[in-house]
Amino acid sequence: MGAELRMGTGPGRWVLLATVLGSGLAMFDATAVNVALRHIGEDFDADFAALQWTVNGYTLTLASLILLGGSLGDRFGRRRIFLIGVVWFAAASLVCGLAPDAGTLIAARAFQGIGGALMTPGSLAIISASFTHADRPAAVGAWSGLGGIAGAAGPFLSGWLVEWHWRAVFLLNLPLAAVIVAVALRHVPESRDPEAARRLDAGGTLAGVLGLGAVTYGLTDAGDGVTPAVVAALALGLAAMVAFVVIERRSRHPMVPGDLFEDPRFAAINVVTLVVYAALGVLILMLVLQLQVVGGYRPLAAGTALLPMTLVLLLLSSRSGALAGRIGARLPLTVGPLLTAAGMLLLLRVDADVSYAADVLPGALACGLGLSLTVAPLTATVFDAAPDRHAGIASGVNNAVARAAGLLAVATVPTIAGISGAAYDNPDAFDDGFHTAMLIAAGLLASGGALAFLFIRSSAPAAGDLVDAVDLFGADGRDGERRDV
């Protein structure tokens, strides 16, 4: 079966359901665990570095292996690798849910990330291979938009689960994975890339994993002081990253083709992605902990605090996408990060005497408005700046950049802010660190807006590149028909 599926048809909806659930599962777990961190730390008597690794163990393997996951799918079958990823993810989730100590949990989280690295690019590649050329942009938009909503909803749903027990956050993945496997086996066609390289880029993969891993270890461990081990890890990580660039330039079958960066917009939009998603990683980690540690919120209330941001993203994605389609991506990508930065500054009011209506809601709404202006134009610019033949790898690179940004931010910003050891048990110390971390995140966002203004051209994207997740499922009365903007 070739690229024959259409949006708004039964077979098309089944393929979208399986792929969106798969990518959404990976996105959900990336954000949901933050709400459970305090309870995990208390149960295991773990320090803050262990909590950082509970987040970063997952993100590290996901970010560093996501391009390899895409290559494996092209070579051995996209549905096959996608399903292996789902089963792998579920098995690792079971180990997470039963982990007897922090070390086992961190190791299982790293294995979860491997499953996510197989699921996420596979789901996008399945869409690209299954839908007709005319409907492909809309299908990709649905995958991106609904997967992002799943990630944003993670803190809310996990807050409800943590009220029962933090282990339920991981065990929920098992029935969801079973649904994905059942739908994919019955409704998702198999596909391969007949022109895929016969050899995998093992050297590039190894250098990428080693580089990200060593740098993350060094930055995380620096919270307890700059030791020779920290310096050695950082030096090794930087050397491995340089090696990655050299290997990719010389390889006959690189994971990242060199001509992908011929359009300067592609490099620029990935730098914007780096700073925006770094700031978002800080927000999601720090706010839910601040509300629990300093504000005295229960997990459900802390997770629910971010719900307005999710709703704004859902409700305004269509309008912001249409706006960017008319005026180009430059202005939304300038204003969006700046508005999100303003929202983070408003959240500095969250303290021991926090009032949700006065201190949390305005900042959450401002962040939602800013992100709704940012996400759709950012994704569209990635595709617009890359050659058509590299659409899949362009998305993979941007996805890896976004995950690596969150990884490095979670490893670095708490250390800079002075949060280490058992700080999550000391409201005064954590409050001071929270304010510093949010100021850093706001600065990152402001720099992202400035970079977009300086380096993103103001021309409008190609027709059909900006889409809305709600309209794609026929909510606009046109049965999922692609909308040109």
Image (cartoon, grey):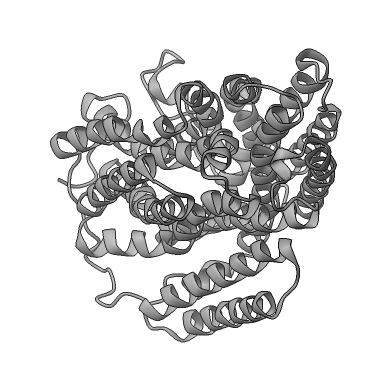
Residue 311: x %, y % from top left: 59, 20
Above or below for 438 versus 278: above
Residue 383 as seen in the image, left or right of residue 267: left
**Can I make out residue 75 in this image?**
yes
In this rendered view, identify the residue nearer to me: 83 or 474. 83
Q: Would you identify the image quadrant in which residue 363 lies?
A: top right
Q: Would you identify the image quadrant in which residue 173 lies?
A: top left
Residue at 64%, 59% in the rendered image: 408
**Can I make out residue 466 in this image?**
no
Above or below for 376 versus 124: above
Residue 58: x %, y % from top left: 47, 52
In this rendered view, identify the residue nearer to me: 437 or 80. 437
| On-image quarter of the N terminus | top left
Residue at 28%, 63% in the rendered image: 72
Residue at 57%, 20% in the rendered image: 300
| On-image quarter of the C terminus | top right
Residue at 76%, 30% in the rendered image: 294
